[in-house]
């Protein structure tokens, strides 16, 4: 291909990467914004910590429930309309949150926001395959996951640092404004999926196609392996971060809560590792890249067993980088391997398992930590990651990674 022809292709790829990264920042900043202000919510509404945490878990639970129906719906109306509706609706709801007159209404708005946010992660990978092709999707998914990690970190830090001077209402306003800015960037930058230009079939044909896509998304072993990675790796990751505050503020580290909250800066490593995942896949292939990323995550978790603060911090940095790399590999792998008529369903199923892992892994990990301590939590998280490695190696087959590496080197 000539240089003249490559220039518009690269420009389009850059535009797509900017759009999905901005959507990720907006979506995940809004999704996790209430986490740092849970103590203020508890004080305002006279709640115990468990009840206050519903401000986070209601949204992630609603996201998990909504993601598959929305992904299936995207097969009918197209990926881009779903993504744009998702980011716009979630930003609007983010600006309405500070106006909630009571905690139950706040929870209703958070549930609606979770449903709205589901439209982006549920169909984004399928959109990227349709827009950029199978071989170009790894780099774009890496940019998207980098945006997700930056958004998760930015939302928590923005809310945490603005809560003291402005209260939790002001903190949510700040995050709502941040989300709106990146939403506007997505609206202006996101091009249509190439598939949306095609002639649409009848409603009956669309419904049959959606059902066939669901069966295809659940019948291909290599796809099942990526769903397992999403479930097990996300479970381990969230379990570690749920207990991180207790680990850092307790003996022997004894940090103040404000200093301990800076652990979320480790998310910056997630943005770096996920953005470079295309090179990792190109060099080692998908299977080896997945195993390597999961192994690095486990090593980071083991480092947190130390009683030395620098080593513990290093452990969180390493496990965060490894996790987001593993997530980017698995997400792009699922999108590339899904049959054309099942991309939305495969993307939605992956996202469903991802947030199911967050819910189940975070809960089980917290119970393990409370009853048996940090060492047993680390053992459980490493065991979950080992299970993901076994599934990837057994179900996916080593030849797939080699074939992908060869294909990427030819591009």
Image: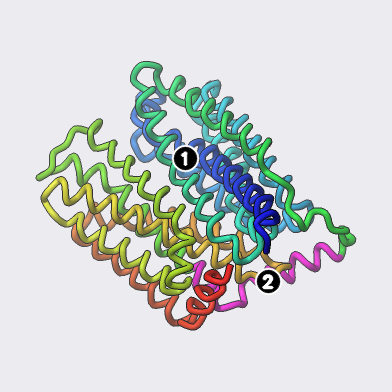
Per the image, label 1 sits on a secondary structure element best described as helix
Is 193 positioned to the left or the right of 218 in the image?
right
Residue 336's spot in the image, x, y percent? 60, 67
Q: Residue at x 52, y 23 (%)?
A: 98
Q: Residue at x 63, y 45 (%)?
A: 15
Is 172 positioned to the left or the right of 257 in the image?
right
Q: Main secondary structure of the magenta part?
A: helix
The span from disc 2 to disc 1 (Cα, nearest Å) is: 30 Å
Colour setup of the view: rainbow
Residue 187's spot in the image, x, y percent? 67, 37
Q: Residue at x 58, y 48 (%)?
A: 17
Q: Which residue is mark 2?
A: 339
Dividing the image into 4 quarters, which one contains the N terminus?
A: bottom right
Residue 312's spot in the image, x, y percent? 19, 50
Q: Which residue is mark 1?
A: 151
Snapshot quadrant of residue 89: top right
């Amino acid at each position: 291909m000539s240089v003249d022809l490559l220039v518009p292709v690269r420009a389009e790829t850059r535009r797509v990467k900017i759009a999905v990264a901005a959507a990720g920042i907006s979506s995940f900043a809004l999704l996790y914004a209430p986490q740092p202000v849970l103590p203020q919510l508890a004080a305002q509404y006279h709640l115990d910590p468990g009840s206050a945490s519903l401000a986070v878990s209601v949204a992630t639970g609603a996201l998990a429930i909504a993601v598959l129906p929305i992904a299936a719906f995207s097969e009918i109306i197209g990926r881009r309309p779903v993504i744009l509706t998702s980011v716009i609706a979630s930003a609007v709801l983010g600006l309405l949150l500070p106006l909630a007159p009571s905690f139950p209404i706040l929870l209703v708005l958070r549930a609606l926001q979770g449903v709205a946010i589901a439209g982006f992660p549920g169909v984004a990978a399928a959109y990227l395959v349709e827009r950029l092709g199978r071989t170009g999707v790894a780099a774009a998914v890496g940019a998207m996951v980098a945006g997700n990690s930056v958004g998760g970190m930015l939302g928590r830090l923005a809310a945490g640092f603005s809560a003291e001077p402005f209260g939790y209402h002001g903190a949510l306003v700040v995050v709502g404004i941040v989300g709106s800015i990146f939403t506007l960037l997505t609206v202006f930058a996101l091009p249509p999926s190439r598939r949306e230009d095609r002639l649409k079939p009848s409603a009956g044909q669309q419904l049959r196609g959606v059902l066939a896509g669901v069966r295809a998304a659940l019948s291909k072993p290599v796809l099942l392996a990526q769903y397992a990675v999403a479930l097990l790796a996300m479970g381990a990751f969230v379990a570690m971060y749920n207990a991180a505050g207790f680990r850092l503020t307790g003996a022997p580290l004894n940090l103040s809560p404000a200093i301990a909250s800076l652990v979320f800066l480790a998310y910056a490593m997630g943005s770096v590792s996920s953005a470079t995942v295309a090179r990792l896949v190109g060099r080692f292939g998908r299977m080896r890249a997945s195993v390597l990323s999961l192994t690095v995550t486990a090593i980071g978790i083991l480092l947190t067993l130390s009683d030395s603060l620098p080593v513990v911090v290093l452990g969180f940095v390493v496990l965060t980088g490894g996790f987001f790399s593993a997530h980017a590999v698995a997400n792009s792998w699922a999108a590339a391997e899904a049959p054309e008529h099942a991309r939305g369903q495969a993307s939605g199923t992956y996202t469903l398992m991802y947030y199911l892992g967050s819910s189940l892994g975070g809960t089980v990990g917290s119970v393990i930590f409370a009853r048996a301590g940090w060492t047993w939590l680390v053992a459980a998280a490493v065991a979950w990651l080992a299970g993901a490695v076994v599934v990837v190696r057994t179900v996916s087959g080593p030849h797939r990674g080699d074939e992908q590496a060869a294909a990427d080197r030819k591009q």
